[in-house]
Amino acid sequence: MEPMDDQGPTTGLTPHVSYPDAPAAVDFYKAAFAATEHARLLGDDSGKIMHCHLRINNGSLMLNDDFPEMRGGAPLPAPGAVTFHLQVDDCDAWFARAVAAGATAKMPPTDMFWGDRYGQVADPFGHSWAFGSPIKA
């Protein structure tokens, strides 16, 4: 059995993503995915987010503002070929809420051969998000 604390599992895999504007990402994820913010740590002098912990659909996402000085001044690389997948109760509702909040529709919800209703959006920061829910009989 996996250890738990008041925030959920204490083990597992949690994505930690850097953004050019982390406060905007936090606001977007709250509107698009009903994220709840559980922690925020600001940089001492910059006021930038050094660490923020969001809960989305009972999972964790950690994020921070970009700190180029921590990478020798290199620019923030573009988002790679990563898709955040959310297994949800209602694919269509999650998709619609994300688009209403400003996400770009990539693949409208469709019944798939593996038994899920599935759709994808791109957030304003270039990241892909997928939604899946069992096809309702």
Image (spheres, grey):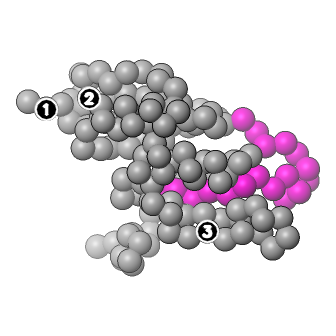
Along the line of sight, which residue is nearer the eye, 102 or 60? Answer: 102
Q: Residue at x 65, y 65 (%)?
A: 51
Question: Does 9 appear above or below 22?
Answer: below
Quick one: quadrant of the N terminus?
Answer: bottom left
Q: Residue at x 44, y 69 (%)?
A: 11
Quick one: quadrant of the C terminus?
Answer: top left
Q: Amino acid at mark 3?
A: Arg
Q: State which region is magenta.
A: 60-78
- Report whether 50 appears left or right of 106: right
Q: Are marks 1 and 2 in contact (CB under 8 Å)?
A: yes
Residue 87 x/y as whole percent: 32, 43
Tag on residue 40?
3
Question: Does 81 appear above or below 74?
Answer: above
In magenta stretch: residue 63: yes
Closer to viewer: mark 3 or mark 2: 3
Residue that sits furthest to the left in the current view: 137
- Report whether 34 appears left or right of 132: right
- The quarter holding residue 70 reads bottom right
C-alpha gap between disc 1 and disc 2: 8 Å
Residue carrying label 1: 136
Q: Secondary structure at mark 2?
A: strand
Residue carrying label 2: 117
C-alpha gap between disc 3 and disc 2: 34 Å
Closer to viewer: mark 1 or mark 3: 3
Lower position in the chain sequence, tag 1 or tag 3: 3
Residue 4 x/y as whole percent: 36, 76
Q: Amino acid at mark 1?
A: Lys
- Decide if residue 56 is in sight here: yes
Q: How many marks on residues?
A: 3
Q: Residue at x 65, y 54 (%)?
A: 23
